[in-house]
Amino acid sequence: MRKSLILPVLGLAILTICVFFSLLSNNEEDNKKNIDLPLMMFDTPGFYDMKTLNQKMLDDVYIINFFASWCKPCLAEHPLLMELQSKGMQIIGVNFRDDEDNFVEWINEHGNPFFHIIRDDGSIAYEMGLIGVPETFFIEKSKIQKKVQGPLFYEDIEKYL
Amino acid sequence: MISLLGNFSFYLTLFFIVIFYLGWGKKILLKDQILLNLIYIFGIAPFLFLVIGFTISDFSILNVIQNSYINDPLFFKITSAWGSHEGSILLWLFLINFFGIIFLKSNNNLQIHKQIIFISSLFVLYLLLSSNPFVYVENSSEIVGLGLNPILQHILFVIHPPTLFLGYIGLIIPFVLASHILVTKDFSQNLYKQMLFWSKISWFFLTFGIVLGSYWAYSELGWGGWWFWDPVENISLIPWLLNTALIHSLQVSIKNDQLKLWSLNLALYSFIAAVFGTFLVRSNLIVSVHSFATDPLRGLFLIVIIAYLFFVTIKLNIKSVIHFNQDTFSLVSKESFLLLNNIFFIAAALTVFIGTVYPLFSELFFQSSVSIGAPYYNFAFNILMSPIILLMAFAPQISWDKNKNKKNKFLITILIAGCISIIAFLYSSNFYFALSIFIASPIIIQSLFLIFKEFKKDIRFYSQWLAHLSIAIFIIAAVYTEQFDQEENFVFEKNGSSQIVMSNGNSIYLKNIKDTSFINYQEILVELLIMNDETEYLLFPSKNIYQPSGQVTNEVSTVNQWLHQYYATISSIESDRVAINLVYKPMINLLWISTIMLVFSIFLSIIKKR
Amino acid sequence: MKILRNIYKLFFIFFFILFTNISLGNVNQLTDYYKTIRCLVCEGQSIQESDTEFAINLKEQIQEKYNSGMELNQINQELIKIYGEEISFNPSNDHFVLWGLPLFLLIIILFLVKDKYRKN
């Protein structure tokens, strides 16, 4: 075979692969990471009750929600969190890199869906691999079952209601 | 009305292309030459119609609504024409036909133009079937348009994409010429010379376009960077590398009739690289700051065009078997060095290409999403380019066939370079900088030798001299500015001092904060003063809030200190504090000067008498 | 050709050592390190260049750990474990195709053209 044919044939092969890949690829939520819950969460006292969490206090299924007063999508998903709380779901709120006054005002103004709130300077977020607020982790039996990046939509919480 | 005219033009150009292909020109009483002119004119027209549509804010065209705002300044209204995916593909079509019609004046070979119009027809189909900018909307007086993305409202944005596209599409002429040569087996020097001329034209625009893009990123993005190995930057670099190799390879082909298949293939691949790159960033395969919001199907559509180009290349290479004699060179000769040049440039282009697409493959085959950025490219690209930079110092002086020049001059140059780089290391304690001096200074030293030795009046000599010299200066300036730049953050409290002492002892003052309203944006401007000894430097970074989208942009402010620059942006501005980010970029102006020198040198090489 | 090959090998070794380990340039190691960490909510930028909360938080956390004595190497490994491989712009050495590529390409091409050189 002529040497000068190597490149164009290779090029076509790459092209074909690109085609197949773009047809096959879908933006599925990658659940490959099964991180253990950071111990920090259990060491940090809650903002209102000053108590630390205990595994016994938690149901089998609960939710960890990262939020901030400066975050608009957090406000958008807030009603859903309230609804979950009204159905008895335990939601731990982690207030991410927020000003204390602003955060308190936000809770007072919009309502508190959380049974326990922890204030985070970013280290808990770091340990959990947070991409950005809002982000919600659905925990079942001490393992992260599902992670939702961005505001929650009805489909995400359907099964928990 | 304009939508109608635009679509009608598409159909007309297709109609005439079909007539031309079927040879039915005589049936409608049109000579082939006139047919070609008609095809090109109706390929050029749609874009002009779109521009008119934007100019008069014709909101019966969907594309105008999506990319323009009734209160946008007229200048930016016009340039919004190529701000969207559809508009930019239409610009492609415009340029293909524009080059076609100009090329027709110098070369009216019907076979060659058949290829051009075929490629043009593929783009027309692409536009009609998936990216038509002329979608008609019932006009209502309430529509004011969604506005041009504020980041794009900048003079550089106006020039940068069209310039780059001129470079990309300019490569179509070498492509069709190369393919014609391989098909007809007509290896006359004249055709090679035409190829060289047109590749220089596209090389000029490509280089200029890349420099503009780089300068735009520098002045807009806010942290003093000018090259990010972003996929879109890479896909403009690849055709540029191949184009550079092509021009050098053609010298050998024209002078000695050697490296012919190399030159021809380089011509074919340069254009393929340009089209492939365009496809890559419009599909959803690559994530980049340049991403167009577009669905993957549009990217796939472009694959048809690229596949066609590859098939042509394969077919031509198969057919080219018997007609090329095996070149042989002496080890140290200009041909041999230029062959090495080809090899290194092609390897570099392949490396950048593979770095850009590797994340896709990694995800597909290894299920791991790897990120490839500056660390990788700095390693791979610099390794490949360094030897060629060294060679660049000496290659122009090496004679054809077998080198007759003395070796002493080369050794002296290397020695001087070594001494200077050691001094540089001792003075700066920076290894990378010293290394860059060692690699790039031979070119500067040789250039100085040449100028003092003989004063030629040959423009061609000067264009080459200037081009190589500017690359050397560029490398030194680039490494220097990246190694020695400094960044600092300052926070001015409302009731605090308006003066802060910088880490180098100078002081920075907050002079004023101004809030001004313009026709389509609101500007919050911060006035800063830096006192360096007795000299004052003023900076005016701002945050702009645009209508109707509410989008906020950070405007950079720079001030010069000879070859260096201070570079300021507002990190955050609240009612009680202002946070400023200040970057000091030494030698950055030398970098830009060297790029201007390079572009000018290419210009010189084109204007010489053919 | 031989001379060139030798000079070239020398360069390769130089660059390889430099870029993989030794920091003989900029004084600020942390800033250099930030440039190798990708901002996951941006489009291809590093956390050094980005202003997003994600980037700022990461910079702060890394700085804290660095100040408390953790090695950059350890920090890097931890980051990859938490965020995945894509957080680092330095592909791991498992991707040897990438790292070996430049030299490999050159050798292949040079091999393909060796016939062009006539023996004197």
Image: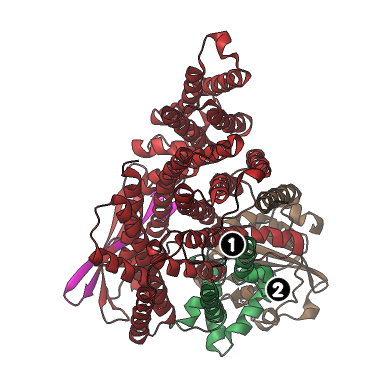
Chain colours: A brown, B red, C green
* Label 2 packing within 10 angstroms: few (<14), some (14-19), many (20+): few
Quadrant placement of the C terminus of chain C:
bottom right
Q: Is residue B409 left or right of residue B327?
A: left
From this view, report whether residue B145 is shown above or below residue B340.
above
Residue B26 in the image: x percent, y percent? 56, 11
Choose between C61 and B607: the one closer to the eye.
Answer: B607
Residue at mark 2: chain: C
Q: Are marks 1 and 2 on the same chain?
A: no
Which residue is situated farthest in the front direction here?
C120
Residue at the spot of label 1: B351
Bounds of the magenta span? B530-558
Choose between C24 and B101: the one closer to the eye.
Answer: B101
Q: Is residue B109 left or right of residue B605?
A: right
Q: Residue at x 57, y 63 (%)?
A: C117
User: Is residue B246 inside the magenta stretch?
Assistant: no
User: Is residue B552 inside the magenta stretch?
Assistant: yes
- What secondary structure is marked by label 1? helix
Q: Give the Cα distance between marks 1 and 2.
A: 18 Å
Residue B279 in the image: x percent, y percent? 60, 45
Q: Residue at x 31, y 41 (%)?
A: B609
